[in-house]
Image: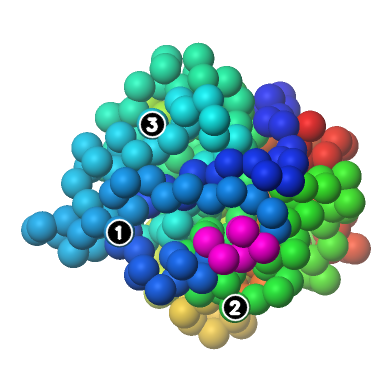
Amino acid sequence: MKPLVRPSRLAPGARVAVVAPSGPVPEERLQAGLDVLRGWDLDPVVAPHVLDRHGTFAYLAGTDADRAADLQNAWCDPSVDAVLCARGGYGAQRIVDLLDWSAMRAAGPKVFVGFSDITTLHEAFATRLGLATLHGPMAAGIDFIKNARAQEHLKATLLAPETVRVIASGGTALVPGRARGVTLGGCLALLASDLGTPHARPSARGGLLCLEDVGEETYRLDRYLTQLLRAGWLDGVHGVLLGSWEQCDALDRVRALLVDRLGALGGVPVVEEFGFGHCAGALTIPFGAAAELDADAGTLTLDEPALR
């Protein structure tokens, strides 16, 4: 697995588009997030359909066609330097095949930020555009607008990425050791759901795999991990970083499952509680970056800053 193309860092005054590829966005949270971005001296613009609601399926932020158009138009707008997702939820899988990837590739590399359901788009940006992306807080996320740590780590990654080359989580090793590879991953359920689709990687071989999820019972987490194992998707992975398991079972129960399933990887370093995902103060993790994982120290050291 090779590192992906890094987009350019943002500068004061950079124009950032906010889109809603998945679930509906509460207006008050959107406005709070925009205020944070303006406080960083960025110029946020809201895509036309961000506050839409689907007429039949209340879990979607507007129609598939409108959500896809918002993302593609923002990406292809030469005045836009970055595209930030407003929130996750569900819906990215419904639009990923509607995007004109040739047009988006021609628009050149830009910063893309999101997590949770946006995992589907991280995979597609990697496979279709060869582009590194940022697994990080979203503009209308409650854990972003109310948490200084999440804000400051994303801000540093966007504007001064050389200051966050070492991501120190405070996490602990489930399996000790060091490993080098290229970062990838996201929400476990979405990675399992993406298997076999045109926009998913064939495997995580050579990668430092980041996994997290929210609101899942242990047997479902077991199902997702077992599916990835049975499909051979985890063959050759170099290291595993585990994020948050918010609203899942008690951590001890989840940990027992993770040890059971990831034990099949044969001594691959695994670090838990790495501080990314659906948690307060979530760290921003670059995807597509060459890095070294030190499971014992709970650190991820990037070879280069996340953004150029």
State which tag comes first along the sequence, 1 or 2.
1
Q: Do the CB atoms of the residues marked 1 and 2 lie less than 8 Å apart?
A: no
Q: CA distance from mark 1 to mark 2?
A: 20 Å
Q: Amino acid at mark 1?
A: Leu
Q: Is residue 26 magenta?
A: no
State which tag comes first along the sequence, 1 or 3.
1
Q: Is residue 18 visible?
A: yes
Q: Is residue 286 visible?
A: no
Magenta stretch in the rendered image: 34-39
Q: Main secondary structure of the magenta part?
A: helix
Q: Amino acid at mark 2?
A: Lys
Residue depicted at 61% across the width and 65% down the height:
36
Looking at the rendering, in which quadrant would you find the N terminus?
Answer: top right
Looking at the rendering, in which quadrant would you find the C terminus?
Answer: top right
Quadrant in which residue 196 is drawn: top left
Q: Is residue 256 above or below residue 19?
A: below
Q: Position of residue 287 (x, y in %)?
A: 65, 41
Q: Amino acid at mark 3?
A: Asn
Is 53 displayed left or right of 49 in the figure?
A: left
Q: CA distance from mark 2 to mark 3?
A: 29 Å
Residue depicted at 47% across the width and 79% down the height:
247
Is 213 displayed left or right of 135 in the figure?
A: left
Q: Which residue is mark 3?
A: 73
Q: Of 45 and 223, which appears nearest the observer?
A: 45
